[in-house]
């Protein structure tokens, strides 16, 4: 017997986490998009090293949560899966737009530099948001992740070519192999040949020294 799919739109409570004080000293807003299996609060701990009073960090937390092992214990979150993917993408773009509007209203946008950092699964999430959402960023940091393969290349060019672009990868990253890395860099070079490549000695992680170096470059 054939089943029929039905869809409804519901209200859902979502959350985001912040680091820093949203006052007049803030020069840089950071929207940091976590990877698969992360949570917003724990992901923010990576940015303590550059929490200097001029930075305000916002970590939206993905809408889909699950136990990382079995049926109890540590919980993680994911931005999407292949199941019902288009709706999940639309949902998280709407969520990220809501976070952006909630935060940006506290500041004078003309006095801010906006940075978007995507890590792992957060990379295609961040790029889709930049492509389809409300946010306009000055800097995009692609950290150990790949561009969304289904994006319109013309739209992607218009997005990536208008901002400073950084690509960061560890030399021991087990998620992205050398062939995948070379392919990704070729694609990125087509969209923004002036991108900056950072490689560090480490794995699939936010490397503290490299993060500090990138911030030093952004704030120079």
Image (tube, rainbow, N blue to C red):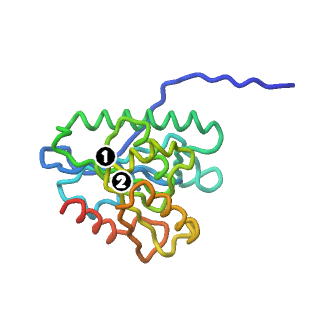
Mark 1 lies on a secondary structure that is: loop
Q: Is residue 18 above or below residue 99?
A: below
Q: Position of residue 12 (x, y in %)?
A: 48, 29
Say few, some or many: other residues with alpha carbon within 10 Å of mark 1 (under 14 / 14 to 19 / 20 or more): many
- Do residues under tags 2 and 1 come within 8 Å of each other at their CB atoms? yes
Say which of 204 and 160 sits in front: 160
Residue 97 image-quadrant placement:
top left
Residue 212 image-quadrant placement:
bottom left
Residue at 48% in and 63% down: 185
Q: CA distance from mark 2 to mark 1?
A: 7 Å
Mark 2 lies on a secondary structure that is: strand
Left or right relative to 52: residue 39: right
Residue 137 marker: 1
Q: Position of residue 107 (x, y in %)?
A: 19, 38
Residue 110 marker: none
Q: Position of residue 62 (x, y in %)?
A: 48, 44
């Amino acid at each position: 017997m054939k089943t029929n799919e039905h869809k409804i739109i519901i209200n859902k409570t979502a959350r985001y986490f912040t680091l820093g004080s949203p006052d007049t000293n803030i020069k840089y807003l950071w929207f940091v998009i976590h990877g698969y299996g992360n949570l917003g609060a724990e992901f923010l701990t990576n940015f303590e090293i550059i929490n200097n009073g001029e930075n305000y960090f916002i970590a939206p937390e993905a809408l889909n949560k699950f136990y990382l092992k079995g049926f109890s214990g540590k919980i993680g979150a994911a931005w999407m899966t292949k199941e019902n993917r288009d709706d999940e993408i639309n949902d998280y773009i709407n969520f990220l737009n809501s976070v952006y509007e909630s935060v940006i209203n506290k500041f004078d946008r003309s006095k801010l530099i906006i940075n978007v950092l995507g890590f792992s699964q957060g990379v295609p999430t961040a790029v889709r948001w930049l492509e389809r959402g409300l946010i306009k960023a000055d800097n995009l940091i692609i950290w150990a992740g790949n561009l969304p393969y289904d994006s319109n290349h013309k739209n992607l060019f218009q997005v990536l070519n208008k901002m400073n672009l950084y690509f960061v990868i560890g030399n021991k990253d087990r998620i992205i192999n050398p062939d995948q890395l070379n392919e990704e860099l070729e694609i990125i070079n087509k969209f923004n040949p002036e991108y900056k490549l950072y490689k560090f000695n480490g794995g699939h992680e936010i490397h503290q020294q490299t993060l500090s170096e990138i911030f030093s470059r952004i704030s120079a």
